[in-house]
Amino acid sequence: MRRQRWFTPWLLIAPAVVWLLVFNLWPSINTVVLAFTDAKPLGGGQFTGLANAERMLDDEQLSYALINCIVYLLVCLPLLTLLPLLIAVLAEKNLPGITFFRTAFYTPVIASAVVVALIWNWLLDDRGAINGIAQQLSLLQKPLPFLTDRWLLLLSAISLTVWKGLGYYMIIYLSALGNVRRELHEAAAIDGAGAVRRFVSVTIPGVRNTMLLVTVLITVSAMRIFSELYVLAGPTGGPGGRDMSMVMLIQLYSRGFTGNLGYASALSVLLFLITIGPMLLLLRFNRRTAES
């Protein structure tokens, strides 16, 4: 048998290590360094200390973006934590036509962003389907400004996120429900527990870890929301730029030859600090679960 040379394992992992260093570690370190400069996209820049942090305190658009992300989180968190679980409970049952509904709920997950943009703009435009039908039925005297009012635009983007997220989180819950023992449901049913009681006392405790994972994923996604708001509000961020998210703001400051790469990097560091909290919470919970 030929002996393995000592450097063979290093050769095997070398491509992955190089990829990690070049495309993950170095950009992360460079972003932190740029956050303390006034660098431009074409290079250069001087060390400015905490000037970018001080600028954040007076940045009105940043306050709009943070408020939008918090509203996104408060609305999406309960909806996308509970609704996919309820759908998954129904989807795992062998009901007539259930395959059609599973496919219907999952289709938005794989839908193209361009197709989604066309559909939702067609629905929500002043002359779109919703306003047109409501006016035909005499429910509205004039069209609702879904795409031109700050809060209606934000709620429309939230609806789009929930529509796309139901199928994705449903799949996660379906895999978790497979680990909930049927004997527990049968024992509860024998004791007289109804469907609601079994859902609360058996199903939810059985998927508790998955619910925490979904909660963290939704929290991080809400703070990093981009495509839904960009699709509906456009690159300007809606009326007065008040429907921007944190990621849209970073993209706004970093693009073009005159962009402020230093300030965009500072915003990226702030976004990282906001999103790392839920991840650390999940890590701590998993560690406690493993120890118990």
Image (cartoon, rainbow, N blue to C red):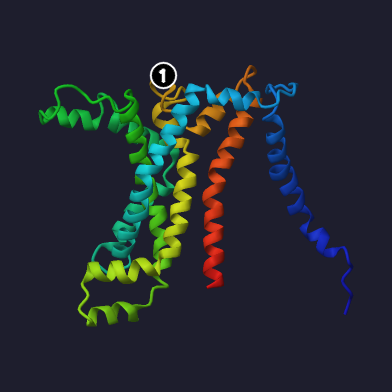
Q: Quadrant of residue 38?
A: top right
Q: Quadrant of residue 181?
A: bottom left
Q: Can you give x and y, in whole percent of width and height, for residue 273 in the image?
A: 58, 41
141 and 279: which one is in front?
Answer: 279
**How many marks do you count on the picture?**
1
Residue 172 seen by the camera: no
Quarter in which the N terminus is drawn: bottom right
Residue designated by label 1: 240
Residue 13 seen by the camera: yes
Q: Can you give x and y, in whole percent of width and height, for residue 184 in the image?
A: 33, 79
Q: Can you give x and y, in whole percent of width and height, for residue 270 in the image?
A: 58, 36
Residue at image x 74%, y 24%?
47
Residue farthest to the top?
258
Identify the element where label 1 is drawn.
Answer: helix
Residue 54 in the figure: left or right of residue 74: right
Residue at image x 66%, y 27%?
50
156 and 292: which one is in front?
Answer: 292
Residue 123 in the figure: left or right of residue 17: left
Residue farthest to the left?
138
What residue type is disc 1 on? Gly
138 and 242: which one is in front?
Answer: 242
Residue at image x 30%, y 30%?
152
